[in-house]
Amino acid sequence: MTTRRANRWIMGSALGLAAFAVALDHTRHRLPEMQPPAGEAAGPGAASSPCGLGTSPCGLGQAASPCGLGTSPCGLGTSPCGLGDGGEAPPCGLGPPASPCSL
Amino acid sequence: MSAPASALAAPGSARPDGFALGLALAALAALSLVVARDVGTRQLLLLWIGFGLGASLFHASFGFTGGWRTLLARGSSRGVRAQILLLALSSVLFFPVVAGALPGVRAAAALAPAGLSVLVGAFLFGTGMQLGGGCGSGTLFTAGSGHVRMLVTLAFFVAGSLIGTAHLHWWAELPSVGRVSLLAPGWAPALVAQLAVLGALYLAATRWERRRHGRVRPLLERDGRPFLTRLVRGPWPLWWGAVALALLGLATLVVAGFPWSITFAFALWGAKLAQAAGVDVTQWPYWNGAYQQLALSRSVLYETTSVMDFGLLLGAMAAAGAAGRFAPAEPLPARSLLAAVLGGLLMGYGARLAYGCNIGGMLAGIVTGSLHGWLWLAAGFAGSALGVRLRPWFGLDGGGRR
């Protein structure tokens, strides 16, 4: 029989470990900041960098940001399945899987 | 989905657990900040929907595992009737959406091949869920509410999912009739037919209980406590759970663009852990799919099922804290832990073969008109019948050594 106190310690430890693993995974997969070549100022290209880079509008919560919309490349939550992407992407389960449906 | 007896015990009088409630809300707030900043608003919404699902599952103790077991072992159909209500409500809500009948709303069905791999996988899953003590969502919400045994089930669920991804390409070669959409004749007639079948199942379950017990326990039961108190602290009547899950499932469908799914995340977590240990899973055919490759190459917070699963865990934790039922003392005999290990492995492996668990495979399949969802139900129920018979061997249900 485990005690309630012991269970709380186990649960707290498990949650802490999971949080550490997620933080590690998240920071490991974030792409590094794009460094402009030495002696060259950041050009207009820096402002329009792809999502996931430090200069990207992704996740800034700006209404005009494309991130999180159906046509955005940002995030896996933006799977093309059934979203308004002009019908070019296959629906779930047909053709190459593009969502977790039926995987 | 099944909750251990301690989670189902008559609650309502215990004081709220500030530790669990505070930890869950703090974790949700921190995760929300990171997801909103780095991923986007859509993912944030899905995190919160997952939180709502976890709280609903816990408060209603809404379980497929327990519902099937009580029907098979004791002839009580209440849980199964609540599941049929969930299937019917979700069908009414989902059919027009996936058929594109609502202007401006597009979402995909959970179509998967209906074949031998689904039959085998769902059977294994059904057996495993009775040994493990919970299905995909049940494992998550009981683990989130502090049941240590379910952490063991969850760990081996992840391991089983990873092993399943190594073998799925072989199973997928087995005979199948392919992806069959039951919405082909039109969503309206398909819905009428589906509701007729579900109605017949409901009547059969009711008759089964009446024959065994001479009466039928109603789904709608009154409780004298104020609505808000009951909403926040639980427990909820089963029908509240069915309605909440149907509505949150619809929210998932509209926001994500595909139905609620759970176990892809387990396979992904296993694959990421395996990669960290030096195993190159990218050599396995399963992980060469477009979605899988993208999921492996990016942070887990970009992957929808993972984020919803995190929300579900935290939602269950918060609900258990509000109800004063977080991390109850529980017996953990070795044979019960062995059942948790086996159950987790069987569920993980079976979910991959069956293209999802009872949520992503069965519920999502049935309510979006995929034939494989019905196959999943039949095979999963048969597997559960075996699992119920095996439980006493592991000292579950009060069974002794045999």
Image (tube, coloured by chain):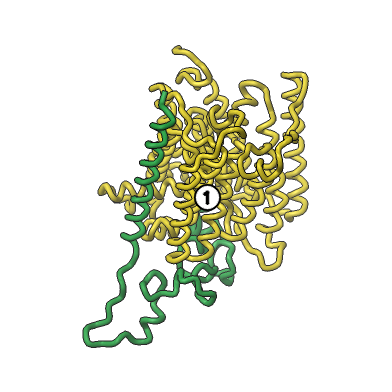
Chain colours: A green, B yellow
Residue named by callout 1: A102
Q: Is residue A19 above or below residue A71?
A: above
Circle 1 chain: A
Q: Residue B188, percent across and down?
A: 76, 54
Name the quadrant containing residue A52: bottom left
Q: Residue B393, percent across and down?
A: 46, 18
Q: Is residue B290 left or right of residue B226?
A: left
Q: Is residue B251 left or right of residue B395?
A: right
Name the quadrant containing residue B98: bottom right
Q: Residue B33, percent across and down?
A: 45, 61
The three-letter amino acid code for the residue at tag 1 is Ser
Work out whether residue B115 can be spotted: no
In the rendered image, which quarter contains the N terminus of chain B?
top right
In the rendered image, which quarter contains the C terminus of chain B?
top left
Q: Name the residue nearer the viewer: B149 or B87.
A: B149
Q: Name the residue nearer the viewer: B380 or B149.
A: B149
Q: Residue B94, percent across and down?
A: 67, 53
Q: Residue at x 41, y 56 (%)?
A: B300
Q: Is residue A67 left or right of residue B275?
A: right
Q: Name the residue nearer the viewer: B247 or B320.
A: B320
Q: Is residue B397 above or below residue B58?
A: above
